[in-house]
Image (cartoon, grey):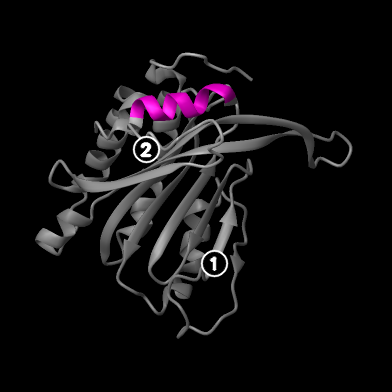
Amino acid sequence: MFYFKAVSMKDNLYIDNSQIVFSFARNMEIRKRLFEFEDALKDEFKVPFITVAIPDELDPNIPRFKSQSQNGHSKIEVSQSRITLATKYDEKFKLDHHQIEKYIRAKVANLSKLADSENINFIGYIIELGIYLEPSHINDFLRENTGAFSIKEDCKDFSIYYSKNYKLDFYLNVKCSKFKEQKLILHNETKTLRPTGQFNHGISIILDVNTKPFFERHRTFEKSLYDKLNKTVFEIINTKSIEAYLKGEI
């Protein structure tokens, strides 16, 4: 694992995971679409899907059926009010923003065909980026780029959060925070991940961009928003540095 003593390049930011959310008006009969989802996604996700046996009247956000991708990196959940695709990226792809954008674009193209049958309110991308830093440098770096003079050497945790409208059609939420994660190693015999007692440190950025402002203005959804949102999110990811996120220069 690499650490950077000085950070000024956006290329140091890796993409750890993503969630793509299709939000729609509540459909109490979403279970009836189970076989349609299985048939459309059977080449990419494990079938049959797992069904959740709860009454239709309960919380619409609870998944009614779900599945995991064939490679195990993604999972899909379908509730009465949303379709969520969550993906965890491995070391091979974390720094390859182009490949991740290509992957997300392809998945959105497939899922949008299913989502378009619902009364869509908005779509959103929630992408977590990160950068590894030497722990002794993190507080100084945060203080320099946020102006938060309360950050001292003994600061164990720190986060900032801001939201704003972005380019008329989008709403943007950004959360930046310190992180500490333990390195894991795959055990060959059991095929399970085991802790190593070694830790990585750094700064995490959760970038949440959605199309709620467009819906609030028009009370409708346009298919052109799929490409527009994807382009907007990856323009931010590919052009903004860790300093820009911390300073709110987005």
Give above or below for 37 relative to 135: below
- At mark 1, the secondary structure is strand
Give above or below for 75 relative to 197: below
- Residue 192's spot in the image, x, y percent? 80, 42
Query: Which of these two is toward me, 92 or 158?
Result: 158
Is 72 left, or right, of 18 in this rendering? right
- At mark 2, the secondary structure is helix
- Residue 35's spot in the image, x, y percent? 51, 66
Q: Residue at point 50% right, 27% down?
A: 138
Label 2 belongs to which residue?
Answer: 105
Magenta stretch, residue numbers: 136-145
Is 49 left, or right, of 21 in this rendering? right
Q: Residue at point 10% right, 59% down?
A: 217
Please tell me how crowded label 1 is: few (under 14), some (14-19), or many (20+) other residues with Cα within 10 Å.
many
- Residue 215's spot in the image, x, y percent? 17, 59
Cα distance in 3D space between marks 2 and 1:
23 Å
Give above or below for 74 relative to 67: above
Label 1 belongs to which residue?
Answer: 65
Residue 172 can be seen in this image: no
Please tell me how crowded label 2 is: few (under 14), some (14-19), or many (20+) other residues with Cα within 10 Å.
some
Query: Which of these two is toward me, 113 or 205?
Result: 205
Residue 48 can be seen in this image: yes
Q: Which residue type does callout 1 highlight?
A: Phe
Q: Which mark is residue 54?
A: none
Is 151 left, or right, of 74 in this rendering? left
Q: Earlier in the sequence, mark 2 or mark 1?
A: 1
What residue occupies the far right of the structure in this picture?
189
Q: Residue at point 26% right, 67% down?
A: 119
Q: Which residue type does callout 2 highlight?
A: Arg
- Residue 116's spot in the image, x, y percent? 30, 59
